[in-house]
């Protein structure tokens, strides 16, 4: 890296230091005097503390920088430099005899491999600071509208209603469709608990059905078997980036006069028959949690082609308050709003979504190449007719008797890995809503999500492969 990206002048502002840290992505800025001599250090943690203490972005850093920093000389032995690291010191400047920066040493960042991390290399910081400096930091601001419009347009749908998270998006959709006590809603056995919880919030009864063997998505045949006169809606979940069979689900829904509410939390940009997921449901719901394809930290969105439902969801989301008469509440609503700060990040993320998806696709291809000759590891199916899956978390199946051993082995070697979701039917609080979910139980016991993060490289993938091979 160009060393100039690591250095700020001691007369710079806190904002300048933040921008320098954003560019170098090292979490640290080295501070030099007029003669170029190193005189201090600041970290992103130091800056957060200053802002929390009430200092402003335009305050000078010279009185706030750390002057008692740890450094190394250019002729120090590598072992001596390594001995200066500890749990707090992760980066060390290396200087010449006149204290001019000549290099720096980083603690090995690849010792621990994360499961997932957000990619924030575009306009995220720029838009976030613009929102921050505008003082519109709550649930009103230009970025909320921009994010709603950009993301719904990306999905090929007319309207977007940003929410505080993916769970509130699901609950808002169900509430807008007047689903409640006495109604039944069909959900898959393999999904995150938010899907079923949102149904329970409304007072409706969830009905859990099994999944397809080849896609891990909700099984349309099981949907048909579960329909009763009380059934009001189906929530297909595009699990781990794999689209459900939306053609068959749509036919079943139309024949039985049912709503389809897509749960697209893990499938931004996935497609069924050339159309993006989210464009099939009467309302479709997304999550923008930190580990999703694009993120706002926490956040969600409902998208719909219905003008009536769009307007109804906006009223429900904003406390049920009238759009014509402020503080007059027409219905009992919720506070499910997203902040302008979150939406600023989401707007920038949406600009880069195709770039992020391409990077994820290429990473999964590296995994596939590594595992193609290895028996006992089956990657998520990417060749099902009419389905274009995306790579959310690289997902594999292994022998169910050895899955937990693989999990333990990888974690012991500081590689973050996650087992598949536990089937809803296996949990005491939900099992009364399910019957005959044998496929989901089997798949769940075999499944692993592998690290899907920009930190990873081919050597890391080879190490993961070797460790799995040892167990299998």
Image (tube, grey):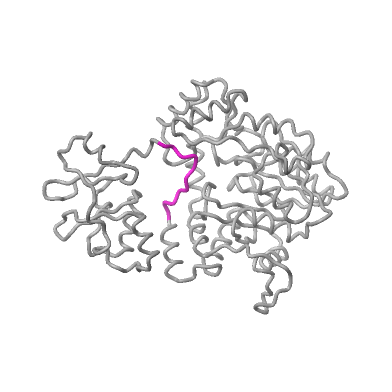
| Front residue (pair 194, 243) | 194
In which quadrant will I find the N terminus?
Answer: top left
Residue 334 lies in magenta, yes or no? no
Over which residues does the magenta segment extend? 112-122
Q: Residue furthest right?
A: 229
In which quadrant will I find the C terminus?
Answer: top right
Query: Looking at the magenta stretch, what is its main secondary structure?
Result: loop
Q: Along the horizontal axis of the image, is 248 left or right of 14?
A: right
| Front residue (pair 423, 265) | 423
Q: Along the horizontal axis of the image, is 266 left or right of 92?
A: right
| Residue at x 16%, y 61% (from the top left corner) | 34
The answer to which quarter of the image holds residue 161 is: bottom right
| Residue at x 67%, y 79% (from the top left corner) | 325
Q: Position of residue 141 (x, y in %)?
A: 52, 69
Q: Position of residue 56 (x, y in %)?
A: 35, 68
| Front residue (pair 260, 436) | 436
Q: Position of residue 237 (x, y in %)?
A: 67, 44
């Amino acid at each position: 890296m160009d060393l100039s990206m690591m250095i700020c002048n001691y007369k710079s502002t806190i904002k300048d230091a933040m921008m320098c840290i954003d560019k170098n992505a090292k979490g640290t800025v080295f501070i030099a005097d007029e003669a170029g001599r190193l005189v201090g250090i600041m970290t992103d943690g130091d800056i957060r503390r200053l802002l929390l203490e009430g200092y402003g972005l335009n305050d000078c850093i010279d009185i706030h920088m750390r002057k008692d920093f740890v450094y190394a000389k250019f002729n120090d032995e590598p072992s001596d430099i390594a001995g200066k690291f500890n749990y707090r010191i992760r980066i060390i400047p290396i200087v010449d005899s006149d204290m001019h920066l000549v290099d720096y040493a980083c603690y090995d960042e690849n010792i621990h491999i994360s499961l997932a991390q957000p990619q924030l290399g575009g306009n995220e910081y720029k838009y976030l600071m613009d929102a921050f400096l505008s003082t519109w930091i709550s649930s009103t601001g230009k970025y909320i509208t921009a994010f709603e419009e950009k993301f719904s347009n990306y999905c090929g749908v007319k309207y977007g209603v940003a929410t505080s998270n993916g769970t509130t998006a699901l609950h808002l959709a169900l509430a807008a469709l007047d689903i409640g006590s006495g109604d039944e809603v069909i959900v898959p056995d393999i999904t995150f608990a938010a899907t079923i919880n949102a149904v329970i919030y409304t007072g409706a009864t969830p009905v859990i059905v099994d999944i397809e063997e080849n896609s891990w998505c909700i099984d349309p045949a099981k949907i048909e078997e579960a329909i009763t006169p009380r059934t009001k809606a189906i929530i297909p979940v595009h699990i781990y980036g794999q689209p459900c069979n939306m053609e068959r689900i749509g036919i079943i829904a139309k024949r039985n006069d049912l709503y389809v509410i897509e749960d697209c939390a893990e499938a931004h940009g996935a497609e069924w028959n050339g159309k993006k997921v989210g464009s099939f449901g009467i309302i479709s719901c997304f999550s923008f949690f930190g580990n999703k394809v694009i993120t706002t930290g926490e956040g969600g969105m409902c998208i719909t082609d219905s003008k009536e439902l769009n307007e109804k969801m906006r009223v429900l989301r904003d406390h049920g308050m009238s759009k014509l008469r402020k503080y007059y509440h027409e219905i009992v609503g919720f506070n499910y709003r997203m902040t302008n700060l979150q939406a600023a990040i989401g707007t920038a993320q949406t600009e880069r979504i195709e770039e992020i998806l391409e990077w994820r696709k290429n990473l999964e291809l590296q995994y596939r190449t590594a595992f193609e000759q290895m028996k006992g590891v089956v990657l998520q199916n990417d060749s099902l007719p009419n389905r274009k899956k995306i790579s959310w978390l690289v997902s594999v199946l292994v022998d169910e008797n050895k899955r937990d051993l693989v999990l333990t082995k990888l974690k012991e070697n500081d590689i973050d890995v996650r087992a598949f979701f536990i089937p809803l039917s296996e949990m005491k609080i939900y099992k009364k809503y399910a019957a005959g979910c044998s496929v989901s139980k089997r798949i769940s016991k075999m499944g692993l999500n592998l690290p899907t993060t920009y930190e990873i490289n081919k050597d890391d993938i080879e190490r993961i492969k070797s460790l799995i091979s040892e167990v299998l």
